[in-house]
Image (cartoon, helix red, strand yellow):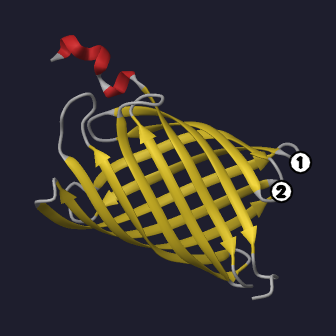
Amino acid sequence: MKAQGQKSPENQLGTWYMYNGSHKLSENYSLKTMAHFRYYEMASAFQQEIYRLGINYTLSPKTNITTGVSYATADVVYDTSSINLYESRFYEDLNLKWNWNKFITKHRFRLEQRFIHKNLNTDQFQHWLRYDLNISYPFSKTWSAFVFNELFLNLNSSKRFNQNWTGTGLLYKWNQNIKLKIGYFQIKTPDTVLKRAQLGILINTDFSKQAI
């Protein structure tokens, strides 16, 4: 149906509206929270919403681990009636951090166990491996720039490569607890390339010094 090329998802700039939170509970433990709302277009044509909750443990200033759960729903095809996807996931992260001059480099290795339900009557179980590289550079007390790349491998598929995200953006430090994020990235799969804008808020809180 090439005549409808103007409605192809490749021709749209989709948008992700994002909340990410990190809430320090003690010297070593933090609570990680996340909610993303993702659209094929700027604010319409729903694609996916995903919620994540995890517990993070700091091993050293440069190394920490996270384990948690997430839940996602998705509309897998743009601009037409399609299969609805529901996912419950367990995940485990290894996070590594290095500083070089003002550059901050972060590596995240993530294992996921995905329980996938299509239209509530087709069930699948899949193991995924993800690797994210993020490099940021603060160019003032309130502004920093970042670039990132994340690789997704489906370990249950004979063709393990599933997608790759590559992007860049800016972070603005509103205050000690809140940062605002704006960015652009591309999602590359074996079949297509999707363009996405990112608008997000990051909230960090510290409850470790409060009396319980």
Where is residue 84? Give x, y as percent. Answer: 22, 48
- Please report whichever mark, 1 or 2, sits nearer to the chain's N-terminal start: 2
Tell me the element at label 1.
loop
Where is residue 81? Give x, y as percent. Answer: 18, 34
Residue with the most extreme front position: 212
Residue at 42% over, 28% down = 41
Quadrant location of the N terminus in the rendered image: top left
Where is residue 91? Give x, y as percent. Answer: 42, 72
- Quarter occupied by residue 104: bottom right
Quadrant location of the C terminus in the rendered image: bottom right
Residue with the most extreme left position: 121
Residue at 70% over, 45% down = 180
Tell me: 186 left or right of 145. Answer: left
Q: Say which residue label 2 marks.
A: 101
Residue 42 vs 102, above or below: the answer is: above
Residue 53 vs 120, above or below: the answer is: below
Tell me: 193 left or right of 34. Answer: left
Tell me the element at label 2.
loop
The answer to whether the residues at label 1 and label 2 have Cβ atoms under 8 Å apart is no
Foreground residue among 159 and 51: 51
> In the image, which is nearer the foreground, mark 1 or mark 2?
1
Residue type of the residue flagged with mark 2: Asn
Tell me: 106 left or right of 12. Answer: right
Residue type of the residue flagged with mark 1: Lys
Q: Say which residue label 1 marks.
A: 141
Foreground residue among 155 and 12: 12
Residue at 40% over, 70% down = 111
Distance in Å between CA atoms under marks 1 and 2: 15 Å
- Tag 1: Cα neighbours inside 10 Å, few (<14), some, or many (≥20)? few
Residue at 44% over, 42% down = 38
Where is residue 163? Give x, y as percent. Answer: 36, 47
- Tag 2: Cα neighbours inside 10 Å, few (<14), some, or many (≥20)? few
